Amino acid sequence: MNEKIHLKENIFYDNKIFLNPPSGDKIIGKTNKILDYISFAKIISAYGVIILHTNKFSFDNFKNDKNWILTNLIEQSFYFAVPFFVLCIGATLLDFNEKYGLIEFYKRRIFKVVFPLIGWNILSYYYRVYFIKSMKKEKFNIFKLLNLYFKNEIYGLFYSFHIFIITYMIIPLLAYVEKNKKMMIYFYCFFTLLITNSLIPFLIDLLHAYKIYLFWPYKIDAGYIIYIFSGYIIQNYIFSTFEKILIYIIGLISFLIQLLGTQISSYRHNRTIEFHMGYLQLPTILYCTSFFLFIKENFSLISKKLNKKYINKLGSLTIGPFFLHWPLIEFFQKFPGLIFRMKIFTFYGGSFICIISFILTYILKKIPIVRYLVP
């Protein structure tokens, strides 16, 4: 008998809200509405972004010594940072139409991302020109300033927010898929993108080492949309124990491919080789999605050690560190003898900058008008 997905009635059972299925049918469900694990994922993502950027100085400047082995381990371990935010978008927003309309959706996104991005670009421009003096003053021209913004030439790290904005543009198209067809369609889209955009191109690139060159014309230019589908599936699909273990094993193998592949190829070429890296590379997608699932499924254990109230509070502050940490890093660059020559800068310096960023965000949220920069 063909399996059916029933999405009509919700029942509460074993801390899950299940979409009521007849006996023998496939169960699709979702966790409680208070998604504490999403807040936790955002916190470690914000921390991960800062660690990656403090680690980048050592990672990009390859040195054939044991210290670079640790540098590479740090880089790969925190490489989930940006994909996690897109996974969170997929987990929380693909059902937005059940709560509010399209106008409200875009209103929220504009206030949460677009206005802060414009504001921080303006502030960062003046910060870099007049305070840090790491950027030349541009003769006022609206088109030049727009290009600085669109090309991320004020701070390159702001590119991730352009990813978020494009993602928000796509969300309504996906959200209005019929409820009883969502999971089936999202699974199809996820595996189609995984195979056409990641698996086959990754295998073709591997063949280059054997001087076998193939052309693949069927790559779907859909960017980070695969993480949107992944986030929704992880949030709403009830995985069996076997499925979870299999996904964790695949994720671990993918992480090792990314770690050891980067390590071996970099030592072989005596420079940093990032072939096995990339947010849309097969190992990264599998590693990030499996880790995200692991956090969701094991958050009850994590929350025993951490207070959910504080997790959710910190989770609401994560946009601030995204904008604030790089100006702070650039500020400390003016004192290389103080901190950047220290081999432990990645963790101690990165953690310090992370703490300062969260504190500043908390303060900014208390100031009228200014608080719109850190919604």
Image: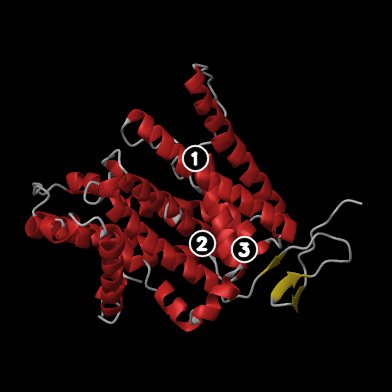
Tell me residue 368's x, y (percent). Answer: 26, 80
Residue drawn at x 52%, y 52% is: 288
Q: Earlier in the sequence, mark 2 or mark 1?
A: 2
The quarter holding residue 327 reads bottom left
Tell me residue 128's x, y (percent). Answer: 13, 55
| Closer to the camera in the image, 42 or 297 | 297
Q: Quadrant of the C terminus?
A: bottom left
Q: Amino acid at mark 1?
A: Gln
Left or right: 331 with respect to 74?
Answer: left
Give the Cα distance between marks 3 and 2. Answer: 9 Å
Evaluate whether residue 175 shows in this view. Answer: yes
Evaluate whether residue 107 shows in this view. Answer: no
The quarter holding residue 111 reads bottom left
Mark 2 vs mark 1: in front: 1
Name the residue at the right extreme.
1
Residue drawn at x 12%, y 49% is: 135
| Closer to the camera in the image, 311 or 129 | 311
Left or right: 241 with respect to 364?
Answer: right
Give the Cα distance between marks 2 and 1. Answer: 19 Å
- What residue did someone put label 3 on? 235
Give the Cα distance between marks 1 and 3. Answer: 22 Å
Categorize mark 2 by other alpha carbons within 10 Å: few (<14), some (14-19), many (20+).
Answer: many
Q: Secondary structure at mark 2?
A: helix
- What residue did someone put label 2 on? 88
Tell me residue 172's x, y (percent). Answer: 55, 56
Q: Earlier in the sequence, mark 3 or mark 2?
A: 2
Q: Secondary structure at mark 3?
A: helix
The quarter holding residue 29 reads bottom right
- What residue did someone put label 1 on? 281
Q: Are marks 3 and 2 in contact (CB under 8 Å)?
A: no
Q: Amino acid at mark 3?
A: Gln
